[in-house]
Amino acid sequence: MGLLEALSADQVTAVTATDGPLAVIAGPGAGKTRVLTRRIAWRCREGHASADHTLVLTFSRRAAGELLTRLAGLGLPVGGRSGPGVTAGTFHAVALAELRRHRADRGRPPPVLLRRSTSLLGPALAAAAGFDPVPSEVRAVEDELRAARLAGRTPATYVPTGRWIPAPPEAVAAAWSAYVVAKRRGGVLDLDDLLADAAALLEDDADHRAAARWRHRHVYVDEYQDLNPAHLRLLRAWVGGRPDLCLVGDPDQAVYGFNGACAELFTRVREDWPGVRIVALAEDFRASPEIVAATEALRPGPAAPLSSPVSTPVPSVPSSRSSRRPPGAVPRLRGFAGEDAEAAEAAAVAAELLGHHGPGRGWSRMAVLARTNARLRVIATALDAAGVPWRLRGERSLADLPAVRDVLDAVAAGSPAADLAEADPGDPDRRDGPETRLLASALEEFLAWSPGGTVAGFRAWLDASGPSGGPDAGVDLATFHRAKGLEWDAVWVVGVEEGTVPIGSATAPATLAEEQRLLYVAMTRAGDELGVSWAGAPSRWIAPLAAAVDALAACPGATEQRRRFARLRQQLWEAGATRTA
């Protein structure tokens, strides 16, 4: 297959552009991964780049694995035991590799990654605050310290960031100091240290910086809108002033503000990367015209033109988003009221899942998405009662899955990681289970990174590479955040009521805007069918969504639907109906 075959004109432009840094703004279903992999393959084929010197930075091991699989399918060598090739990994995993390489070159032991920062932070907080904190209080302080670090603070210069903290500021500062000391004494790094130490190494060591930039000459960043200041600092250290950089993402899907992500990165992309060329992909290849039209009512609003000067915001995807799919079903909206509204909503969703399951529509092609895990528990209870299998898209590292943990614990930490291939799980019933298959795949990937790596190094790499999606088959249950980057044929978005969507704590304009983007992300996961429901007072964003759905239902022609909805959306925007402030 030709690398430019079956691409739209805008996708071809994104794949073949050669002049300086490139920013690809790709809306939901716009073929972001296809464009990214085709661009890498095309540039290598045309002699503009070398696979051996190509680095792709992602935010999950799943995303990195998918990229490498697609690149291999396009005939490109990918990093592995068979030889060099394209390198892809999370920021944390690549930073860990950078530090390991530097220490190995100097005969020093590899860095040890702290598996759970709360194991040291909890006792430090207890001693400083004078009480035994519960896990949620320790996590709150963990989030606060991350925000403070991103703001350039230290224990000595700490001031509250505005988040809720369970102790006085002076106690939090003291806990921070004790936590730093405990890490130093234990010789361990946390995930935030990985990024900071790797960036400092590149900034301060000219020889290592030159070697790293020689090794990573062509740099690609997936989901650019999810970078926080620590990611951006490390990226700048890797890239320097070189033009061979490609950024791919969508500012309308910037939903990680709680982790310090810079939602305005695309706004200042011209200042951060001088000479950057911007290409926007507005066609949706995944969702039906009806879903595209309805979800457009949830986007923040029309964007500035692409030719805007530097002083104005760089746009999001143009407001003329369209679908390449044939017409389909109009999204369904449904409200529930009364004392048992949540249970009634959950039972209705379970019944609809049963009705939609069948040939060509397996359980794994459907998902139920909610803003909170608490709402997912209500859904899970109803699915159990209806006999619908489900799996929870969780936050655990692969190393925390029971069968995987059994294997890791059965082999000494200092042993070669390759020995894990011969180890059996403690429970014989798990030997051929999905968790051990995931382990085998991850082990092969790790040995591609580090052929001589140890079991301890493999465990650290797993923790640095992000959560596992979970191996069991069934309807996916996921929070809006966990659903990002995934897609299903049919999606039920539940709990869209005031106090939950937006979440009750979101009151500032910036946090409300992020909550709106989060709902947009959840709804755009659907390809063929979309259901939206609420129990109680409907969310403020149901009104514009209902107006869009009514317009679609009253106008069955797909072309006219898009035309009529474009007019309706402009009217809603002008009336301020979709503003979040």
Image (cartoon, rainbow, N blue to C red):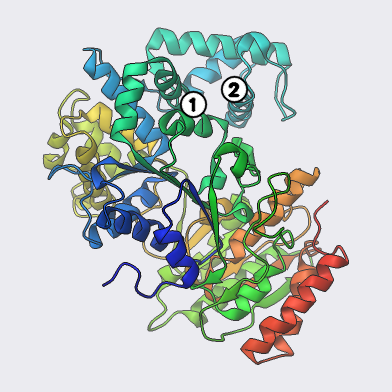
Name the residue beneath numbered marker 1.
Answer: 192
Residue farthest right in this picture: 575
Give the camera-side residue of 566 and 504.
Answer: 566
Q: How many marks?
A: 2
C-alpha distance separating marks 2 and 1: 9 Å
Q: Can you say whether 187 is above or below 115 in the image? A: above
Quadrant showing the N terminus: bottom left
Q: Tell me the tag on residue 85.
A: none
The image shows residue 314 at horizontal and vertical percentages of 66, 51
**Which amino acid is tagged 1?**
Asp
What residue is at 61 percent from the left and 19 percent from the top?
Answer: 132
- Considering only order in the chain, which callout, 1 or 2, is on the residue closer to the N terminus? 2
Closer to the camera in the image, 482 or 510: 510
Q: Dot 2 lies on which element?
A: helix
Question: Mark 1 and mark 2 in contact (Cβ < 8 Å)?
Answer: yes
Image height check: is 263 above or below 237? below
Which residue is identified by label 2? 149
Residue 470 in view (yes/no): yes
Residue drawn at the location 54% of the way across and 15% of the way down: 123
Q: Is residue 128 visible?
A: no
- What is the crowding at mark 2: few (fewer than 14 residues within 10 Å), some, or many (at least 20)? some
Name which quarter of the figure residue 81 lies in: top left
What amino acid type is highlighted by mark number 2?
Arg
Q: Residue at x 76, y 82 (%)?
A: 550
Q: Position of residue 105 (x, y in %)?
A: 22, 17
